[in-house]
Image (spheres, rainbow, N blue to C red):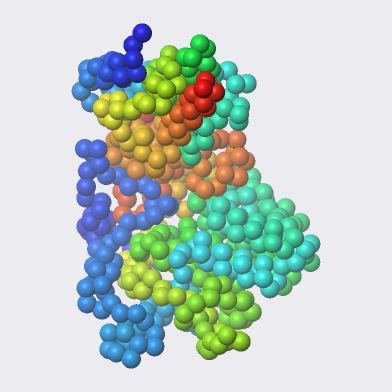
Amino acid sequence: MVKTELNIEQIRKDFPILHQEVNGKPLVYFDNAASTQKPKVVIDRVADYYSNEHSNIHRGVHSLSAAATEEYELARKTVQDHFNAKFDHEIVFNRGTTDGINLVANGFAKSFLKEGDEVIVSELEHHSNIVPWQMACEQTGAKLKVIPITDSGEWIMEDFHNLLSDRTKIIAVNHVSNALGTMNPITDVIEAAHSKGIPVLLDGAQAVPHMAVDVQALDCDFYVMSGHKLFGPTGVGVLYGKEEWLNKLPPYQGGGDMIKTVSFEKTTYNELPFKFEAGTPNIAGVIGLKTAIDYVNEIGLDAIADYEQELLEYGTEKLSQIEGLKIYGTAKNKASVISFLLDGIHPYDAGTILDKLGIAVRTGHHCTQPVMTRFGIPGTVRASFAFYNTKEEIDALYEGLLRVKKMFS
Amino acid sequence: MMSINERQDELIEEFSMFDDWMEKYEYIIDMGKDVSGLTEELKSDDYLVRGCQSRVWLIPAQENGILQFQADSDAIITKGIVGMVVRVLNNSSADEILKSDLYFVDKIGLKEHLSPTRSNGLVSMIKKIKTYALAYSAKAI
């Protein structure tokens, strides 16, 4: 297969924010795992929507409302196609990954979990895929079981298989680790889970910017993601759920749009996906997300994945040249994330100096305290790359880290 | 004995020698290294001031109405700044500390470290110092 070469110089022109100086230095934005930047088409689409098209959606009899509804539902179609969901009503718009996990965890607590049941997560999870399940367990008396990880940041699959039992009611794990970049062997997990009739929720927040995701091929039962990590607006996300599961789950929030009929005696709920979309949604966000998905697809996720792997390899090789630098997360399959520590230098100190050099990295525990505890460290410095990043920027990080080392030696 | 403001002005004077951020931070890092710090056993949760990223420990003491603080942090930059705060506020009465306005942080160009979003524990530490001062001041009455 011939690889499509990305024209990075051209692509960078699409992102207005990248062309600025921070602390007098050209911005090097390596905090993409926290949030990605927005191409101008997305920014313009949101502005245009508010300038010319805004109205509340559904049930409006006037033209603006009908047009806004059409755009909103068209976005659902785009998301359905993008993730290859079977039906468009399997796509629920919400505030983001955290919101999606809470919806499912809440529904499980209400309808499926009882004392003695078990929920499996992994040691690699973001707090937002731990805490909602802990809360569900507290409410129901169910127990949280954790897949441990190896020194390289990979699940110990033997332990996972041993955790599976008749008591397991759901497995909720990430597709790609935000702290270490590990691409997890989710197909093995889904296959093993389904052989015992256990549903699987995948936290796809860190996967969707880096690869094409096909929920039918994966056969996952739920998939959650955030728009802002896929070059779209903040405050919008997607929960994909198989029709049968979404039908089985009770509504999460009550309010407008999610009802069929309301009386003080009895309310009947709307059908999918509206049952889970109470209240006026983030219409502009949803429409902006559609544009972001179209933008990414125009470039091509396969080409993006290839280029990001190139950046990852280059970055790993380059940073490894720095004496005393240790990379955390050395799995064979990784997304373009490098988490590391310089010997004896606190991540906060390193991040502060890098910021002075115009380099934006994330420092700290990355909302994955169990991972940090596992490695016995307070946190890491994390550089995460997107397809608009360059090898020259990695060189700048390398030089910056040499400077950090010198300053703290 | 110098007042809190005199000590702040002295620090501002020291920092006025530096032309760029590099020199400033090198100075803070040097100060951080010079802070004698706390022994490992004193770095207990009892004295921990929770910041999101770097941890700060603070131990108060009072003698003849004068307050003394000892502080430490696991990040050197934070430790340097914490050391400056302690240098400015130590040897003062509880009332003086309660009335104090720490303008030096802004004046030496480190305002960003006082922003709560930096989560370095400094803001919490200053709050904690004032809480201790308030407690000592209440006891004195």
Query: With B15 as the anchor, is A111 left or right in this view?
Result: right
Q: Residue furthest bottom?
A: A61
Find residue A62 and report its image quarter: bottom left
Q: Nearer the viewer, residue A283 or B10?
A: B10
Q: Quadrant of the N terminus of chain B?
A: top left
> Does any portion of residue A84 appear in the rendered image?
no
Q: Residue at x 24, y 17 (%)?
A: B13
Q: In this view, does A160 lie above or below B101?
A: below
Q: Which residue lies furthest to the front in this view?
A: B141
Q: Residue at x 55, y 30 (%)?
A: B48
Q: How many marks?
A: 0
Q: Which residue is drawn at 64% across and 79% down?
A: A248
Q: In this view, does A390 lie above or below A108?
A: above
Query: With A54 as the anchor, is A186 left or right in this view?
Result: right
Q: Nearer the viewer, residue A374 or B2?
A: B2
Please state the horizontal and vertical placement of residue B134, each as a whole percent of the image.
48, 28
Please state the horizontal and vertical placement of residue A392, each as a whole percent of the image.
29, 43
Q: Residue at x 41, y 59 (%)?
A: A229
Please state the horizontal and vertical placement of residue A258, each as a whole percent of the image.
50, 81
Please state the horizontal and vertical placement of residue A35, each as a whole percent of the image.
39, 54
> Does any portion of residue B54 appear in the rendered image?
yes
Q: Is residue B4 above or below residue A120?
A: above
Query: With B61 as the anchor, is A408 left or right in this view?
Result: left
Find residue A41 and report its image quarter: bottom left
Q: Which of A212 and B16 is in front in this view?
A: B16
Find residue A408 and report its image quarter: top left
